Amino acid sequence: MSPAVTTPTAGSASEAGLAAVRRPRSIRVLWLVLLVAVLAAILLLSIAFGSRVVSVQDVIAGLSGSVDGFDHAAVAKRIPRTILAALAGGALALSGTVTQGVTRNPIADPGILGVNMGASLAVVVGIAYFGIASATAYIWVAIVGGCVTAAGVYLVASIGREGATPLKLALAGAASAAALASFISAVVLPRNDIADGVRSWQIGGVGGASYASIREVLPFLVAGLLICLVCARGLNMLALGDELAAGLGQRVVLTRAVASFGAVVLCAAATAVCGPIAFVGLVVPHVCRLLVGPDHRWLMPFAAVTGAALLTAADVLGRVVARPDEIQVGIITALLGAPFFIAIVRRAKVREL
């Protein structure tokens, strides 16, 4: 009698692929609790610190809705800014995590692949030629621009025998981002009526946050989050390689398309409200993998919380170091992320994940 042959299932194969780097559940839960506590502390610091430091009593009064004093009013103004920074940071970090999982590229993030610039160009064209003004219109236009750019970068990188390798994706994304940035300048330069506003928005920041803009962007962020979470197991399968994933019943093309769409929705929505903010989606996934491993079912919530903490902390730093003025959060993340990007390139040598 011939020995029985056990056919691996999709779940068992993905579990085996992650076993070597798995963290115990108790350790992962502990790290997640600590990260949530750190995020809560940073949120309070964001409300209390700025060009003017306010007391704990003023923070409590501002949170309760009382604005009968200058400090109370400052707190009330910082609350939507803090909320938007946390939402945008979580969205960008989650978008970067999914992008790296889809492309299996350790240096992939929406900014490096040109998605940020594609969304930005679409918004600028909408402002300049179609007169769009609402946050909802910005978001829809940014999603279209981000999707078109992502598809274009992937098609360009797919040309050739080897297909869309990590190196070709990075090069195609960098070239596309540079070209799109030039197009943005070409659109803005002749239009003095929108130039100042667009330039300020392009730096990337959360200073103009309001409850109205948060309400308009929140449904898109929730939708993108749900799409990405649904694709978590599929991304684990893709980490095994396309051939093995397909052999185990995974619809590779569909998984990539749906996960990519979720990542673009998150990135485009955050970009439409805050402007293009770089490097959050690159840095956070690598940090979280050190804590929780490569399992996307855990990696995604870790990335969302860590990204929220990072962008909020960067916003606080930008307000504190240049008092009474402030440095836009997009500049702070660029200063922090650029050395990290160089270190990843030197260490990973653009290998696949």
Image (cartoon, helix red, strand yellow):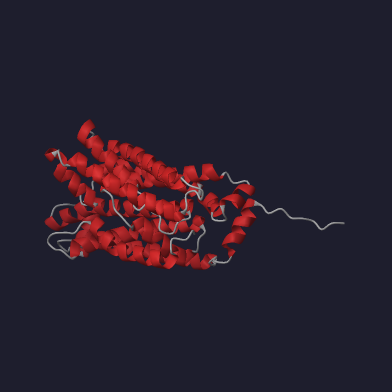
Where does residue 7 sit, x and y in percent of width and height?
71, 53
Q: Residue at x 63, y 46 (%)?
A: 249
* Image point (22%, 36%), residue name: 127
Q: Is residue 206 left or right of residue 242?
A: left
Which residue is at a point 32% across and 51% down the rendered structure image?
88
Q: Residue furthest front?
A: 161
| Residue 111 location (% of width, % of height) | 34, 52
Instruction: Name the side, left or right, on which 282 lies relative to 248.
Output: left
- Of residue 124 and residue 12, the one placed in the foreground of this image is 124
Q: Eyeballing the image, is 301 above or below 118?
A: below
Location of residue 98 in the rendering, given as x and y in whole percent from the top left corner: 44, 52
Q: Quadrant of residue 34?
A: bottom left
- In the picture as drawn, the residue positioned furthest to the right comes out as 1
Residue 50 on image: x %, y %: 18, 61
What quarter of the picture does the N terminus occupy?
A: bottom right
Q: Nearer the viewer, residue 275 or 307?
A: 275
Is residue 300 at least partly visible in the picture?
yes
